[in-house]
Each structure stands twice: as structure tokens, then as C-alpha cells.
Image (tube, helix red, strand yellow):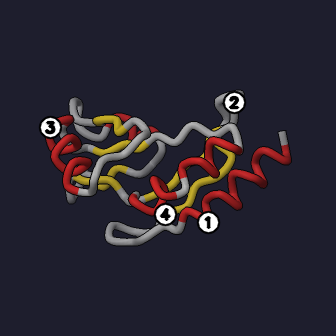
């Protein structure tokens, strides 16, 4: 997520709203964001009922009580255009996500 923050202007230039969703509480989010120097995009809590949003996208791992680490790109019409799972400990690269955003934007 720090990689996304470093590239936030590129996402904004693509008319993209970055959001992050986690099953942790807003207090955990605040502490985490502070620990990395802050983030400029919303960090949403899918806390209670735990994982309800992630479940709708098939990303809640109920046996572990956590979500899969994934990226979901939704167009302005609210239609899911792209989903990528990188697994629980996986990493994402902002440049790769930005390329996917550009593909979605080109198709709309």
C-alpha cells in the first residue's frame, strides 16, 4: 500500500478513486497508517459483521478470519472489471495496477 501511496497522483490522473478495505478495526487502520507515514486515500473497515464486504467478492477466508489480499477494479457504472488475488502475504505493484486501470478506462 505504500507503493500505491507513492503513485497516488498517477491514479488520480486516471480519474481513479483508490480505496482500501480490511477486516481490521478503524483503530488498527489508524495505527497502521501512522506507522507508514500516513495514506491519502480512504481505508475502510469491513469489521462488523467481520468480512461482510469481502464475502460478497469471494475474498473472505472464514477459516482464517481474514481476507485474501486482492485488488478489485470497479468501473463508474459499478461493474467489477478486474480482480486479482495475490494471496495472504502477496505483494502488488502500483505500476501493474495502474496498467489495469488504464485498460478498464480505455474500455469504457
- Secondary-structure class at tag 3: helix
Q: What residue is shown with label 4?
A: 85
Discs 3/2, front: 3
The residue at 43%/39% (across/down) is: 41
Asked if residue 74 is positioned above or below residue 48 in the image, the reply reads below
Q: What residue is shown with label 2?
A: 76
Q: Which one is earlier in the sequence, the residue at label 1 or at label 4? A: 4
Asked if residue 88 is positioned above or below residue 4 in the image, the reply reads below
Q: Which one is earlier in the sequence, the residue at label 1 or at label 2? A: 2
Q: CA distance from mark 1 to mark 4?
A: 16 Å
Q: Which one is earlier in the sequence, the residue at label 1 or at label 3? A: 3
Do the residues bearing badges 1 and 4 touch, measured as CB atoms within 8 Å? Answer: no
Q: Nearer the viewer, residue 13 or 66?
A: 13
Discs 1/4, front: 1
Q: CA distance from mark 1 to mark 2?
A: 21 Å
Q: CA distance from mark 2 to mark 4?
A: 22 Å
Q: Residue furthest bottom?
A: 90
Q: What residue is shown with label 3?
A: 27
Left or right, 45 with reference to 10 = left
Horizontal and vertical percent position of residue 64: 21, 59
Q: What residue is shown with label 1?
A: 95
The residue at 26%/48% (across/down) is: 33
Amino acid at each position: 500500500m505504500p507503493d500505491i501511496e507513492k503513485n497516488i497522483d498517477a491514479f488520480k490522473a486516471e480519474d481513479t478513486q483508490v480505496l482500501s478495505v480490511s477486516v481490521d478495526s478503524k483503530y488498527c487502520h489508524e495505527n497502521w497508517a501512522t506507522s507508514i507515514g500516513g495514506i491519502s486515500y480512504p481505508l475502510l473497515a469491513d469489521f462488523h459483521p467481520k468480512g461482510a464486504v469481502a464475502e460478497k467478492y469471494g475474498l473472505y477466508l472464514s477459516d482464517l478470519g481474514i481476507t485474501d489480499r486482492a485488488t478489485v477494479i470497479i468501473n463508474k457504472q459499478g461493474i467489477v472489471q478486474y480482480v486479482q488475488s495475490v494471496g495472504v502475504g502477496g505483494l502488488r505493484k502500483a505500476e501493474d495496477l495502474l496498467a489495469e486501470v488504464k485498460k478498464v478506462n480505455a474500455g469504457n
